[in-house]
Amino acid sequence: MPPDLKPLPFNNIEAFPLTTSPHPEQLDNIKAQIDLVLLALEALTGIGSEAMLQAAIDLNLESMVADRVALWRLRQSNPLRKGQGGRKKLDVEEARALVLISCHLAKQQHELIRRAVALLEQVTEQQRQPHQTALLGDYLDKFNNTYQERMEAGDAVSPETLMNLALKLLIDLLFYSSNHGFRRMWLALIDRTKLH
């Protein structure tokens, strides 16, 4: 196998080269996107801050995410959140750390994510509503409730818009749970937040 095709060690930030550095303006959007990915993971799997802190330990990222307060401040830097201001800035290294944590957790939950996406494909083919299945219905309800509870514009966003966002994030999670998910997620974040 050529050296560039070998699977990269998943727990090493050095295996995650910074090929594209975001503009400071992009970082605001990146913060929001990462927080939404974590929110989707929480809604689908029921994981909380303990699992995220454990992932930071597994990945040797305790220096950036040392405890619940540090994690809260990093997530609170999302400009969409209510009471935003726990921390105004998220630097590139912290953003990369949160990407690694998100993908590590997604990889651990790969089977559940795959099952949920397969179910979504099935109900779409049958022209049924995702809410009509227990797994997707629970996920969508939790996602909507958490979004409305935490985000500044939560109550102003239509249920249909929130459902579309939740389902898009679910499909994204399937890609992020792959072996090179962290690269995919980082490139997607950069691409989605490009300044035109």
Image: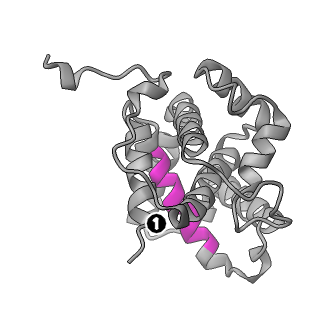
Majority SS type along the magenta span: helix
Viewer-side residue, 7 vs 126 = 7
Judge whether residue 171 can be spotted in this image. Answer: yes
Q: Is residue 121 visible?
A: no
User: Percent x, y for residue 94?
Assistant: 61, 41
Residue 37's place in the image compared with 28, above or below, is above
User: Residue 100, position in %: x, y?
Assistant: 53, 35
Residue at 43% in and 48% down: 186
The reply, left or right, for residue 77 in relation to residue 25 is: right
At horizontal 46% and vertical 66% (from top left) the residue drawn is 193
Q: Quadrant of residue 183?
A: top left
109 within the magenta span: no
Question: What range is drawn magenta here?
Answer: 162-174
Q: Amino acid at mark 1?
A: Thr
Closer to us: 61 or 37: 61
Q: Image check: 106 left or right of 155?
A: left
Looking at the picture, tell me which residue is in the foreground, 92 or 166.
Answer: 92
Colour style of the rendered protein structure: one colour
Residue drawn at the location 65% of the way across and 27% of the way down: 56
Label 1: state its secondary structure: loop
The residue under label 1 is 193
